[in-house]
Each structure stands twice: as C-alpha cells, then as structure tokens.
Image (cartoon, coloured by chain):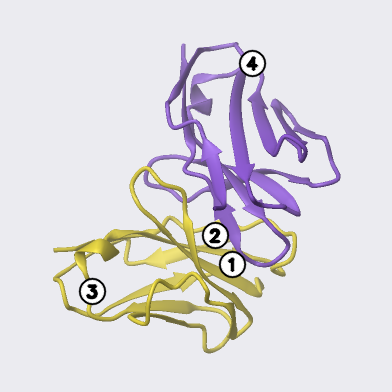
Chain colours: A yellow, B purple
Amino acid sequence: GAGVSQTPSNKVTEKGKYVELRCDPISGHTALYWYRQSLGQGPEFLIYFQGTGAADDSGLPNDRFFAVRPEGSVSTLKIQRTERGDSAVYLCASSLTGEIDTQYFGPGTRLTVL
Amino acid sequence: SQKIEQNSEALNIQEGKTATLTCNYTNYSPAYLQWYRQDPGRGPVFLLLIRENEKEKRKERLKVTFDTTLKQSLFHITASQPADSATYLCALNTGGFKTIFGAGTRLFVKA
C-alpha cells in the first residue's frame, strides 16, 4: 500500500507568486494534517482536516495561507503572495481517525521563495 | 510561555551503548507524548506513544518514560547501531488535534 505522497517534491518560486502544494493521504484515512518545518526545527502545526472540513486551522500564520480538502481525500495547501520567509519544507500527514492515532508523514515539499 | 525543549546539541555515542534523549516541557498538560524519528530529506516516522497515566513503554530496543511531575520524557535506545543515527523528535498532544513538536536531537552512533 502506498504511503502519503506529496507533490511537487521541490518548488522554487519568486516572491509575490502563488503556489499550490498537493498531498495524497493514505487511502481511508479521515484525518489530514499540514505542517511546516524550517531548518533545525521540528514540524510546526498549520491545519487539521477531519473529512472535508478544517477542524483546526489555528496554525495558519496569516490569510495568505489556505488549504482545502474538497472530497475528503487529496488536500491542497495554497499560499498567495509568497514571501521569502515562507521558504521551508511543508509536510503532510494522515491518520486513520484523528484521535489518539499514529500520524503517517509524507516526504514533504521543499518550497524556496527567491 | 509554553515550551518543549530537546537537547539542541548532537549526541554522539559508540555502537552498542545506550542512547538517552531528553524532552522537557513547560506549561503544557499533555494527554500523551510521542517520539518520532526523522532522517534527512524525509518526513518523521512514528516510534512510540505514551499516555499521561503511563510511566514507561517499550518496543524492541526502544524505551520511553514519562514523568508528568518532572514534566519530562526520556527516550532510550539500547544496543545502539549506526543505523539508529537520525534526528529524534518529541511531540506533545494536549487532547485536541494539534500536535506540538520539539526541535529534535540529532543522534550519531559510531561503529
């Protein structure tokens, strides 16, 4: 069975541009999480989905960040008007139910904003 | 303020020895605590979970302890091997959906 996959693996963009990062969770997992990880730091929580709805988006840093999961499976993290400080690895994880449950992480998308 | 602290200095040990990593936290009341392994260029991989009412958990060569009075968890790898070299992350969950990660400690096991 496939694990969590993320595309692209690397994304280089210019300041001010719009980017979309995609996450394909493990089939059947209802819970999906997005994290951001800067060099030398642990993953920083951004948003949690239970099914199609964002159950907790308290980690999104500002309104330039938005995420969707329209059919309860694939999720897209969208960043508008990118800034150099957005450069990081964006990690996606899924879990079966979202309760006390193992989170399975994807390999991440490395975003570089020039 | 709320903090999770892991030793930022890398831990270097000899193969066969026991590695002990520390996770301290302040101003949290975690419902459970997890340890993850992360290799360069990869996402974290779940290792062990311990609940607030548990003192110790074991899995093969791994052992985790959880002291809610000291606000500390210790992670042990016995009979360490070079393949255990990685960054180890401590993560707290206070009962909601948000998982809070520490910055991790890098472990190097020399042959």
| Disc 2 secondary structure class | loop
| Residue neighbourhood size for the residue with mark 2, other residues' Cα within 10 Å, grouped as few (<14), some (14–19), many (≥20) | some
CA separation in Å, label 4 and label 2: 30 Å
Circle 3 residue: A82
Q: Find residue A53 and report its image quarter.
A: bottom right
Q: Which residue occupies 65% across, 30% down?
A: B75
Mark 1 or mark 3: whose residue is earlier in sequence: 1
Task: Using the image, tell me which numbered label, if any, was put on residue B6.
Answer: none
Circle 4 residue: B79
Task: Using the image, tell me which numbered label, if any, was put on residue A3.
Answer: 2
Please state which of the two labelled residues, at mark 3 or mark 2, is closer to the viewer. Answer: 3
Circle 1 residue: A26
Q: From the viewer's perspective, is residue B68 above or below residue A99?
A: above
Left or right placement of residue A87 versus residue A26 in this view:
left
Please state which of the two labelled residues, at mark 1 or mark 4, is closer to the viewer. Answer: 4
Q: From the viewer's perspective, is residue A17 above or below residue B3?
A: below
Please state which of the two labelled residues, at mark 1 or mark 3, is closer to the viewer. Answer: 3
Query: Residue A21 location, x and y as percent?
Result: 36, 73
Q: Are marks 1 and 2 in contact (CB under 8 Å)?
A: yes
